[in-house]
Amino acid sequence: MIAANPGEAEFLRRYDASWYEKPSFTVDLVIFTVRDEHLHVLLVKRAEHPFKGCWALPGGFLDPRRDASVDACAARKLVEEAGVRAPYLEQLKTYGSRDRDPRGWTATTVYFALMASASVRLRGNQAEACWVGVRGDRVDFDLGFDHARILADAVERLRSKLEYTHIAVHLLPEEFTLPELQRTYEIILQQPLDKSSFRRRVVQADMLEELTGKQRDGFGRPAQLYRFRDYDRQTFFPRSISRHAR
Amino acid sequence: MIAANPGEAEFLRRYDASWYEKPSFTVDLVIFTVRDEHLHVLLVKRAEHPFKGCWALPGGFLDPRRDASVDACAARKLVEEAGVRAPYLEQLKTYGSRDRDPRGWTATTVYFALMASASVRLRGNQAEACWVGVRGDRVDFDLGFDHARILADAVERLRSKLEYTHIAVHLLPEEFTLPELQRTYEIILQQPLDKSSFRRRVVQADMLEELTGKQRDGFGRPAQLYRFRDYDRQTFFPRSISRHAR
DNA sequence: AGCCATAGTTGTTTTTTGCAACTATAATGC
DNA sequence: GCATTATAGTTGCAAAAAACAACTATGGCT
């Protein structure tokens, strides 16, 4: 390739570089659940280098032959890597840089998923996988790559979405009680909420369907069971939930 | 490459595919401003196939040699492709699929930027570039690729962020008046707001610094000039702005 | 039956908002 | 000059919403 002048040569070099040197592209998952009164995230132990033996978020390379889209890739990895089904899956953010992976330039599009603790059934393909408690916005040990940062961003997004939307219902089984829902909010927002304000808010949002006749038995008075009304719609609250802090 | 059994062969094939068949990776920009009482977006006319001659969002291939990160690539393209400086740049979302570009599997990470109309200085490198008015969540002519969908998502994100954060200040010059800020909100949210409620909200958020002595002259009484206090912090309103609709 | 624990409601006080009338300060036209 | 007009900014009050606390309800348990 012979160029008439330095400017043209430079242009051609850049053009070639853009076309042929592509960054590696992966998809990672931050899968949340609530169990034992704490927020948990699903982590896998890496079987290969780099960061072999380290805990990391489940995920891996996108395969253009198999994955029709990034969303489809995330849905596939949810089943294949994490071995779980989650009712809520949303794109979080894309992290890409020269130095986040020792093998070279990589970009990863991270999704975050919510699921009920009950439906957990780990059958990680090759890697060991387990739920790890989240303290604040981190877990207790080191994560590979920039996954600690990604986890912190995901926790922040989870908290802020909880303030304004109903998505906490996806952390519970299909049928749940209002005290259970309130407890979920309290665990994630890390502050107690006022019972009567919370109920007023949730009922006015008209997102729940009362399962008349069905109740959750327990210690004291049995609680009314509800079901989330429209599984697709994204309902927004007019005010943030944490205003009910007391 | 000889494998002992079908499972291993399949594994190796996938591994190779993941490594060597990477999707092309681009970065696109949705740059917003407000001028002539309307929201505008910066578009460029494509000089090359595909979609040659079509209007599209500015952007292009990430160059791993020059771009240390996706964020850095977006900042570079803001200057090189769009020829503008913007005080606010935020990642929107990543769109990737087999069929969004006729050349094959591509992923694009889209950023959205806000800037004051005054500081516009188009010097598009090779392409013709101009501001185009946004009606609802679209422009009046066809866009290449899936850029119409991307634009609609960006407008939606802009509206929802306006409700809860101060980011509208980045659509104004450094010094502005409260009526100008209110007008910006009204233009983007497409509804009139109550003057006294709006002022109460903005003043209580404590995000503006009064430039005592400086005023904007005009027809009636001159308006007090303000400056945004902390250019980095992201301030959140406790309630959505559109509650002041009247 | 009486106690305890939790669910759910109701009523009162306090805060926030919606709304409209009011004042303030400039330019303009006569 | 001075009324008029146009926009900026304030104030006061009624209405709505939220915080708070006390209340009732309903089960299990001894």
Image: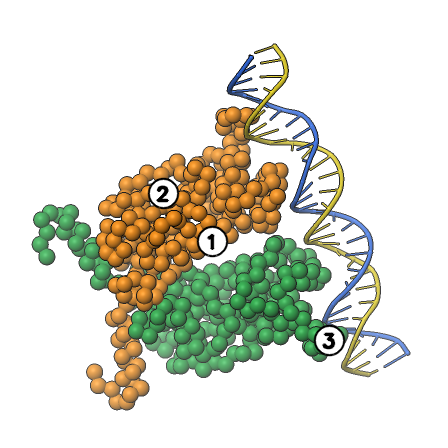
Chain colours: A green, B orange, C blue, D yellow
- Measured as percent of width and height from the top left, residue A209 is found at 64, 69
- Residue linked to disc 1: B157
Foreground mark, 1 or 2, reads: 2
- Measured as percent of width and height from the top left, residue C3 is found at 84, 74
Position above or below: A236 against A140: above
In terms of secondary structure, where does tag 3 sit? loop
- Residue linked to disc 2: B131
- Residue linked to disc 3: A222
Q: Are marks 3 and 1 in contact (CB under 8 Å)?
A: no
Label 3 environment density (alpha carbons within 10 Å; few <14, some 14–19, many ≥20): few
Q: Is residue A245 visible?
A: yes
In terms of secondary structure, where does tag 2 sit? strand
Q: Label 1 is placed on what type of residue?
A: Arg
The front one of B44 and C11 is: B44
Q: Chain of mark 2?
A: B
In terms of secondary structure, where does tag 1 sit? helix
Which image quarter is the C terminus of chain B in? top right
The tag earlier along the polypeptide, 1 or 2, is 2
Q: CA distance from mark 2 to mark 3?
A: 61 Å
- Measured as percent of width and height from the top left, residue B175 is found at 47, 34
Q: CA distance from mark 3 to mark 1?
A: 42 Å
